Amino acid sequence: MRTTASLRLVTGTRRDDLAESVAHASSQQVRTSLRVGLPEISDDWVNCGRLLSDTAGFATWRAALAEWLYEQYGDAPERTTAGYVMTWYLGVPGYLAALLFHHERRVPSLRPEHLAFHTARPRPHPDSIAALDDRFVCLPDDPAARSREATVVPDEQALAAVLRGRFTAHAARFIEAFAPTVRFGRHTLWAAATDALDDSMLLAGRYGGDEGAGVLDAELLLPARLGPLTSGSTIRPSGTGWTRRRESCCFHYLLAQGKGACSTCPRLLPK
């Protein structure tokens, strides 16, 4: 496992505030743009807290997704639009937190009110994520450990516990808001939350050029089943790299012209 000291040697740059950390983490991947604060023109950004308070936004999001899926595959069942949106939304706090933990050993605020996202067009997935609070949790040797914005914890296990707790709190609020709008049980919703954390950490390592390091961080974050999350990390070797078994289903296989179940689907891979 990487130590904090070795992390500093890898990154090689002193970062004194969260904006610098987010910029560096964003530069280590190509999947989603990350930033601190909203751009000057932000009318098309969605604040997570507001979305969870007014769940009509989920219906609008799913309708836009249904239009795109119809153009690609034909009619999209309700479970498929719900599964996509569930996965995409939980990836907002999960991916931001995983990237900052993996590259910077920092955990930002994951309160819904402190996160926002922008959706792409025509495929309405989150293509940008914004952290709206400057505070973060870090380790004792972090260069900004004595700053006003920092809260220090003693070691990596404690930092992983903070990340897991903050993400779980956000996921609980999402599930409370989203569950009445879909026909999913609580297990399915918490399985999707588990996937968001585990998959995001694997991607952080993969995009950053050290997939194995992402695997180690996923094991640190999800060493075992820690309720309400549904499992420990399910990452496993695959050929010369790594894959994982999803805990939840995105219901892509229900599309009439789709390609069937995903390779990581729990319908295909044994536990």
Image (spheres, rainbow, N blue to C red):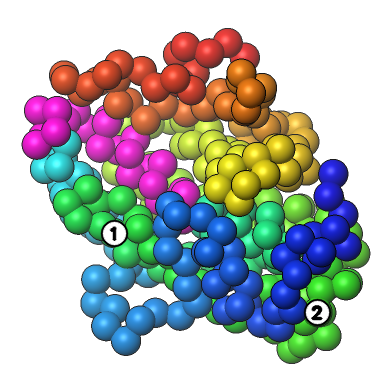
3, above or below 267, in the image: below
**Dot 2 corresponds to which residue?**
143
Q: CA distance from mark 2 to mark 1?
A: 34 Å
Under tag 2, what secondary structure? loop
Determine if residue 265 is in view: yes
Q: Is residue 84 magenta?
A: yes
x and y, in percent, of residue 198 in the image:
61, 39
Which comes before the other along the chain, label 2 or label 1? 1
Q: Which quarter of the rendering shows the C terminus? A: top right
Q: Main secondary structure of the magenta part?
A: helix
Left or right: 79 as drawn, with respect to 163 = left
Residue, x 73% and y 43% (percent of image)? 213
What amino acid is labelled 2 in the image? Pro
173, above or below 79, in the image: below
Toward the viewer: 264 or 26?
26
Q: Is residue 42 magenta?
A: no
x and y, in percent, of residue 136 in the image:
68, 73
Q: What segment carries the magenta color?
A: 70-92
Residue, x 47% and y 11% (percent of image)? 268
43, above or below 194, in the image: below
Left or right: 213 as drawn, with respect to 100 = right
x and y, in percent, of residue 157 in the image:
84, 52
Q: Residues within 10 Å of mark 2 (few under 14, many from 20)?
A: some
Q: Nearer the viewer, mark 2 or mark 1?
A: 2
Q: Say which quarter of the image contains residue 150.
A: bottom right
What amino acid is labelled 1 in the image? Thr
Q: Which mark is residue 119?
A: 1
